[in-house]
Image: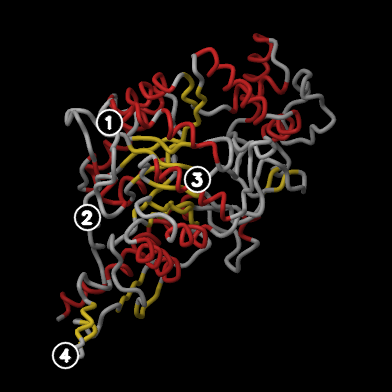
Amino acid sequence: MTTTDQRKRQVILAAHFPGVNNTTVWSDPDSGSQIDFDSFVHLARTAERGKLDFFFLAEGLRLREQRGRIHDLDVVGRPHTLSVLAALAAVTEHLGLAGTINATFNEPYELARQLASLDHLSGGRAAWNVVTSSDAFTGENFRRGGYLDHALRYERAGEFIQTARELWDSWAPGTVVADRATGTYVTDPRAGEFEHHGPQFDIAGRSTVPRSPQGHPVILQAGDSVEGRELAASTADAIFSRHSAFDPARAFYTDVKDRLATYGRDRDELKILPAVTYALGETEEEAQANAAAVRRQQVSPQTAILLLEQLWNRDLSAYDADGPLPEVDPDVSADSIIRGRAPMYKEPLKTAKEWRELADAHGYSIRDLVIHVTGRQSFIGTPAQVAEQIDTYVQAEAADGFILVPHITPAGLDPFVDSVVPLLQERGVFRTDYEGATLRENLGLPPARPASSTARARRAVSA
């Protein structure tokens, strides 16, 4: 990374394509398509113009339903993640391409092949955000079904990543020589052979894709439970964190970084990247007004009721979003009213009591309360103030950088790139140009370590 002050920690920035949550204001007149390729191209090229590290794409394997209906908490009709990223590889040159792919309902052989292919096609810019699911509703789309409990899905994810790495390592660097003079195409006639026997996967054969530019695509992980943190500390290159308020972010950062030593890893081998929104203005007052206006768009009256239902687990469609909270308690005995998403609240009765007290203390309507309790960390202020806030987080080790979540598709990232990025560059904490050839290099990550039990290693031992 370019820096004018080597003492300062460098900021990592990524761009999230909006969607799959109520951050996206699809109804805003400035919003474009969530499906047309032009939308993906616009955001990716803006991110690359700003020298951001990577483009991040979420994925849902099944549309969420609430009370049996698709609703505007999801942006529907998203094309397949790897298809979009492969197409973006052709219209960008340096930007990393990160996709969310589920480790519960895929198979290592096929996914490792697809990710290695993306790494080849992009010249070493592929990243995989590993997510899991034990949701039976989502599982209905798959032969496997939704039978995995929480602990087992992380066991499967850990073995999935290990197996993928074994597949990627089954081709040693430099195996393909394609020497026309000698007629030698590969130096190892057993290239690509693999053999994995474990509780989750029992497979053997040959990987069809030679070693990719990064060796291993960059691995991101988003889990927050103890199991998720351990999985990240043992295997991930970066965490897509939900802890973005300063104190919780710093506590999470310290906790996860401290776990790395157990796995023989240095603290810089795992980057922690909270997701954040932002609101800008020429003055702080204007930025605050813009932020408030965006939140009113994000939480429409309909959305306020839908989000409240997720805690109450009841049909609240008869309630007025501008009125008081329901007098009835959440229904903790019924099946979840929402399908396709993990339960949001572990103690509904306790949380509802806290929300009532909060509403009473501040005179909140349902919509006011939902706006207050569902907001995520947002950097609000003038471009200079936002640049300072970002720099403060990174220098104080509350984050290594951020995944930016604009609320407008696809042009919501433009003002950030045009006004905040130059100020970060002036502060000497953000690159002025790409220096690495691969995403791994641009993130400051070490070269991919070969998997500890690769097919090649086993062959060497048995030879």
Cα gap from disc 2 to disc 4, whole angstroms: 32 Å
- State the SS at label 1: loop
- State the SS at label 3: helix
Kind of residue indicated by mark 1:
Val
Judge whether 416 appears above or below 196 on screen.
above
Q: In the displayed structure, does residue 410 sit left or right of residue 66? A: left
Sequence-first disc among 4 and 3:
3
Q: How crowded is mark 4: few (under 14 residues within 10 Å), some or many (20 or more)?
A: few
Which residue occupies 60% across, 40% down?
21
Reading the image, the residue beneath label 2 is 447
Q: How crowded is mark 1: few (under 14 residues within 10 Å), some or many (20 or more)?
A: many
Which residue occupies 48% across, 55% down?
153
Cα gap from disc 1 to disc 4, whole angstroms: 50 Å
Sequence-first disc among 1 and 4:
4
Sequence-first disc among 2 and 3:
3
Judge whether 92 appears above or below 174 on screen.
above
Reading the image, the residue beneath label 1 is 429
Reading the image, the residue beneath label 4 is 182
- State the SS at label 2: loop
Q: Which of marks 3 and 1 is in front?
A: 3
Q: In the displayed structure, does residue 413 sit left or right of residue 10? A: right
